[in-house]
Amino acid sequence: MKKLMLTLVIGIFAGTASFAAAPRDEVIKTIKSYEKALNGNDVKTIVGLYSSSPVFMPQHAPAQVGKEAVQAAYEGVFKALDLDIVFEIHDVEVIGNTAWARTTSAGKTKILENGAIVSEGNNELFILKKQNGLWKIHQYLFSTNLPRK
Amino acid sequence: MDRQKIEKLLSQYETALNQSDASAVVPLYTADGVFMPTEAPTAQGSVQLLASYKHVFSLIQLNIKFEIQELVISGDMAYAVTMSRGQVTIRGPKITQPEENRELFVFRKDSSEWKIARYMFNKSKPSK
């Protein structure tokens, strides 16, 4: 009987664990959603992945502070570029409602103005916040890791 | 207290950069620390960090000052957004020009000492 109870208890815990995704996995899910939206020129989804008071720090541009600025920045990016990149997630650390992730992205970028296709290679650091149960991009900075031509 | 310790860490990093002192930079990082310079390979861990900073300092001499724009501490982790401004001298041709970067640091508290865990920067001005 004791053994049966123990089996039941373990079963219940195992069941609970399988329903609640680990915070780390949730952070990875946000980054994978960002990758998909970036490749799909999907500004609406991207803005939804950012926190309520985000800061986006693209290279060679001023910091984009707040949702409206972030939206305008991505609209500008997609008017100029068509991205086809893959993110590799190297580190994710979660402490309470804050997390950070280090990624690299690589692939091809089409410059819409002249149709040229160039190689893309970047480092990224994401700071994420958990808001209303979801992990959102709060601060984000990227920079190329390819040597200057 | 934690805030002051991180401010001191950044100040030590600034001094080490301005003195081109690679061996003073390395202990400011965690053992698994990662430095992601622009347009260059990423360095992870003491051996790679030392080589990477030595390489940087063989090319340029910095004279910059960090300004902390945001510093957020969450338990044993913290992050900071900073701006650094000043001058850089390119050692070969001895050309001195203005230098300005924006940085994102991730810090970790390892046995009561705050260290740089991840660090990268970019430029906020248009590319020339």
Image (cartoon, coloured by chain):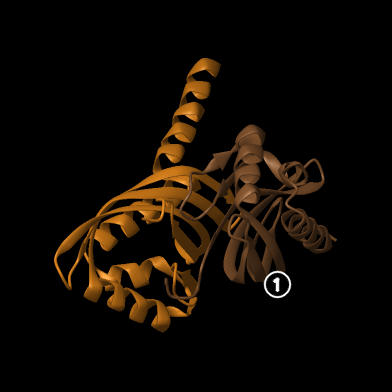
Q: In this orientation, does residue A134 appear?
A: no
Horizontal and vertical percent position of residue B7: 78, 63
Indicate left or right for A24 with B9 as reference.
Answer: left
Q: Position of residue A9 (x, y in %)?
A: 51, 29
The correct choice, above or below, for A128 with respect to A9 in the image is below
Q: Which chain is brown?
A: B
Residue drawn at the location 45% of the way across and 40% of the way down: A16
The quadrant where residue B87 appears: bottom right
Residue closest to the eye, A94 or A60:
A60
Does residue A82 appear to the left or right of A68 in the view shown? left
Q: Position of residue B104 (x, y in %)?
A: 58, 61
Chain orange in the figure, letter? A
Q: Label 1 amino acid? A: Glu
Mark 1 = which residue? B67
Q: Count neighbours of disc 1 (C-alpha within 10 A) and say few if under 14, some if 14 to 19, many if 20 or more.
A: some
- Whether residue B58 is visible here, answered yes or no, is yes
Name the one closer to the observer, A137 or A147.
A147
Relative to residue B87, is residue A105 depicted above or below? above
Q: How many marks?
A: 1
Q: Is A137 left, or right, of B29 in this rendering?
A: left
Q: Secondary structure at mark 1?
A: strand
